Amino acid sequence: MTDSIPDPISPPARLLMGPGPISAYPSVLTAMSAPLVGQYDPFMTATMAETQELYRGVFATRNDATLLVDGTSRAGIEAALVSLIRPGDRVLVPVFGRFGHLLAEIAERAMAEVHTIETEWGQVFPPSAVEEAIIRVRPALVALVQGDTSTTMNQPLDEIGAICARHGVLFYTDATASLGGNDFEADEWGLDAATAGLQKCLGGPSGSAPITLSERAVEVVRSRRRIEAGIREPGDPSAPDFVRSNYFDLGMILDYWGPRRLNHHTEATSMLYGARECARLLLLEGRRAVIARHRLAGRAMLAGVEALGLAVFGDVAHKMNNVVAVEIPTGVPGDAARTALLDDFGIEIGTSFGPLHGRVWRIGTMGYNARKDAVLITLAALETVLARFGVAVPAGGGVEAAADVYAGAE
């Protein structure tokens, strides 16, 4: 029987230069191998509180309700939406890519009356379009992606919060792909709720979802009815304000992370350690310095792919710092070229979804990989693969253009 037992896990060496997940910071992986402690050990509860304070710095907020939801970034999204939405609430979702459709789907599952507005993939919404829709729909909540990796677009949020406040609307954003690598100011922009994940600009593995909630959002969460045996009177599952998830009930999760430490689940200890290290590294380097590093790496990669003769998809003025979509050259089999990059160079880049499937590659420069050597190696490998598939590329052109961007920043 022992012949059928596999060897210990030994993943191949990869340079993950797609839209995420990315290669984690080595110290994050080290932190995740630290010894476990009990969930109410003083070290554990102190680490939870410490992590909350670190993520206040990451989100640029003073919100007391800043914590982690155990699960991938989608767990954070779902926790926010099912806890903030009452069945029948009108929810407005401006959609400019795949992940706007995801927000709409989750809001529908939370039994909201969902209204969407859409713009062409590769574009973003002007604030006036969002305000016009708010006036027309009169929603309780606006749910808007900041950076949608399916299109690589970065939706400006700086005016949306004031618009929502003016009309008495809660404002939630999914910052999974953007937080840490792009400008983000939770308090200054008037956000009521924001969620993220570790596997993009924060430089960790998927599995923990940082979240922050304004006082107004917390009031909505606290007002929801729930079943919590032995602590509160049981709620009526048929009541319109009943939170239909136990695991994602933010009211209960807030009690677990709060001073009372009311049992809700067993915290994912190793993920807590990893999330703490992601935030610690970001704040140690400096939040604005990390954003600037992503901006520089993104500029270098953009210059490099353009120098290779690749057309860039979408409105470049609103592109995220940390990912670029390039048109696959005519005659090049997109998946075969990606496979060649992976097999021959150990480098992963991404394809895309929906109307962009098979049309673009998505190349990321984020987290640990938002650095000069990763950018140059990827461009050199991409040049080789393009030439192999018959594309006329200037020898060394991509690397030289990217190196010039870095040289100009020194």
Image: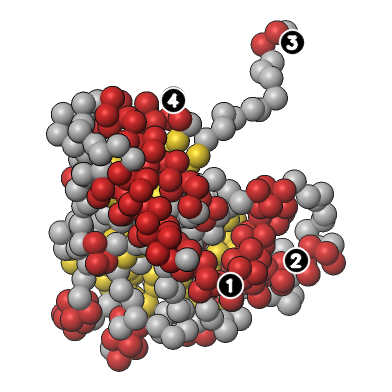
Q: Is disc 2 placed on a helix, strand or loop?
A: helix
Residue at the spot 73% in from the left edge and 77% down from the top edge? 259
Cβ atoms at labels 2 and 3 below 8 Å apart: no
Q: Is disc 3 placed on a helix, strand or loop?
A: helix
Q: CA distance from mark 1 to mark 3?
A: 50 Å
Q: Earlier in the sequence, mark 3 or mark 4?
A: 3
Q: CA distance from mark 1 to mark 4?
A: 36 Å
Q: Nearer the viewer, residue 340 or 72?
A: 340
Residue at mark 2: 47
Given the image, on which type of amino acid does mark 3 rest?
Answer: Thr
Cβ atoms at labels 1 and 3 below 8 Å apart: no
Q: Which mark is residue 221?
A: none
Report the mark closest to the observer, 4 or 2.
4
Q: Earlier in the sequence, mark 1 or mark 4?
A: 1
- Residue density around tag 1, few if under 14, some if 14–19, many if 20 or more, within 10 Å: some
Q: Earlier in the sequence, mark 4 or mark 2?
A: 2
Query: Is residue 387 something that shows in the picture?
Result: yes
Q: Nearer the viewer, residue 2 or 296?
A: 296
Q: Nearer the viewer, residue 344 or 26?
A: 344
Residue at the spot 16% in from the left edge and 29% down from the top edge? 331
- Residue density around tag 4, few if under 14, some if 14–19, many if 20 or more, within 10 Å: few
Q: Which mark is residue 2?
A: 3
Q: Which mark is residue 344?
A: 4
Residue at mark 1: 286
Q: On the image, which quarter does residue 156 sit in?
A: bottom left
Left or right: 340 with respect to 22? left
**Residue sticking out furthest to the bottom:** 166
Q: Earlier in the sequence, mark 2 or mark 3?
A: 3
Where 388 falls versus 64 (above or below)? above
The total of numbered circles placed on residues is 4
